[in-house]
């Protein structure tokens, strides 16, 4: 069985397993403690998917017969920390400048009090999320596809999957009465967003571009450190701005619910991409 077929089988097993595991997970948690009453079915569905992804990962990797990171076209990076810091700055500075402009034009309004405890959570997310997602999307997924597909095809596939995973989100409380079919209903409700052209333009396309930039950074450096830095910079600045500002309207398709959704973030992402390419050319000449 080819790598792509094994990859499809893994994703199918994760989704089917999550669909079947989520209802009993929901029922058991709600019977065990009233603490879980505040969590809707979608929260348990997402956790069930994560559990299945971890449970099926080891047999999936065994079937691929991976022996080292070189099998995923990854090399040791002598400038790892330089790339992480550069990525944070290349992603964070354009986004921060854009945020300042939005505050100056009063599209974003500063909050009266700074939620310091929430900022700590943003920092934690900016560290943990890039590590997990870059290892999976640009490390494992892209690396597997590169073994049998051209870089452009592998990048297109990975970026599309990255965008779909982040774009699809079922509405809260979409499953008030939980049954064995609730997981399938969650998937159907998630795809309903594709019926809204503004949401597709503002959300999916921007996420797809972000995924492509991260994949390009990985291919150009044959390492995950620059993508991790870029991803971290985006999450940290967007998260801090989101906690420190408020807004009354959403101006789709220009700007969505946060600084990572909309045509304005799309333009800022293109600026980061251009800066990244220029910086890599300079860095490669300096260390050649």
Image (cartoon, rainbow, N blue to C red):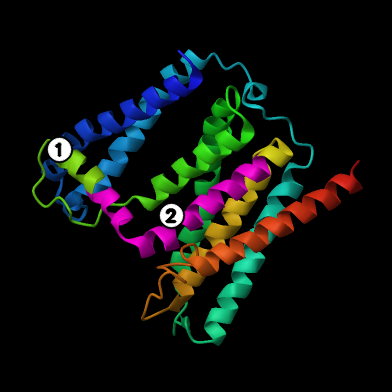
Measure the alpha-carbon separation of dots 1 and 2: 35 Å
Whether residue 191 appears in magenta in the rendering, the answer is yes
Return the mark for residue 28: 1
Could you tell me which secondary element the residue under label 1 belongs to?
A: helix
According to the picture, the residue beneath numbered tag 2 turns out to be: 204
> From the viewer's perspective, is residue 17 above or below residue 210?
above
Q: Is residue 42 left or right of residue 125?
A: left
Residue 287, magenta (yes or no) = no
Q: How many marks can you see?
A: 2
Residue 283 visible to the viewer: yes
What's drawn in magenta, residue-wise?
189-218
Residue 222 position by quadrant: top right
Q: Quadrant of residue 251?
A: bottom left
Most frequent secondary structure within the magenta stretch: helix
Residue at x 44% of width, y 65% of height = 118
Q: In the image, 28: left or right of 145? A: left
């Amino acid at each position: 069985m080819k790598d792509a077929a094994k990859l499809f089988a893994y994703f199918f097993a994760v989704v089917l397993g999550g669909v079947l595991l989520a209802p009993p997970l929901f029922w058991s948690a709600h019977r065990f403690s009233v603490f879980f009453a505040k969590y809707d079915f979608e929260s348990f569905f997402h956790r069930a998917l994560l559990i299945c992804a971890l449970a099926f990962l080891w047999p999936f990797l065994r079937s691929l017969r991976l022996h080292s990171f070189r099998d995923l076209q990854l090399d040791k990076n002598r400038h790892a920390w330089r790339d992480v810091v550069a990525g944070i700055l290349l992603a964070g500075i354009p986004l921060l400048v854009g945020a300042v402009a939005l505050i100056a034009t009063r599209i974003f309004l500063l909050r009266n009090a700074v939620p310091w405890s929430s900022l700590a959570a943003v920092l934690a997310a900016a560290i943990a999320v890039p590590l997990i997602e870059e290892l999976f999307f640009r490390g494992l997924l892209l690396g597997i596809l590169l073994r049998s597909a051209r870089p452009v095809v592998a990048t297109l596939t990975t970026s599309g999957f990255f965008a779909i995973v982040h774009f699809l989100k079922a509405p809260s409380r979409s499953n008030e009465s939980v049954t064995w079919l609730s997981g399938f209903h969650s998937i159907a409700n998630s795809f309903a967003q594709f019926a809204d052209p503004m949401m597709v333009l503002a959300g999916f396309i921007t996420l797809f571009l972000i995924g492509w930039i991260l994949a390009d950074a990985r291919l150009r450096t044959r390492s995950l450190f620059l993508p991790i830095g870029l991803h971290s910079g985006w999450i940290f600045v967007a998260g801090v701005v989101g906690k420190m500002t408020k807004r009354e309207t959403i101006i789709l398709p220009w700007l969505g619910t946060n600084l990572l959704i909309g045509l304005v973030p799309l333009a800022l992402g293109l600026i980061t991409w251009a800066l990244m390419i220029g910086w890599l050319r300079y860095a490669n000449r300096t260390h050649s």
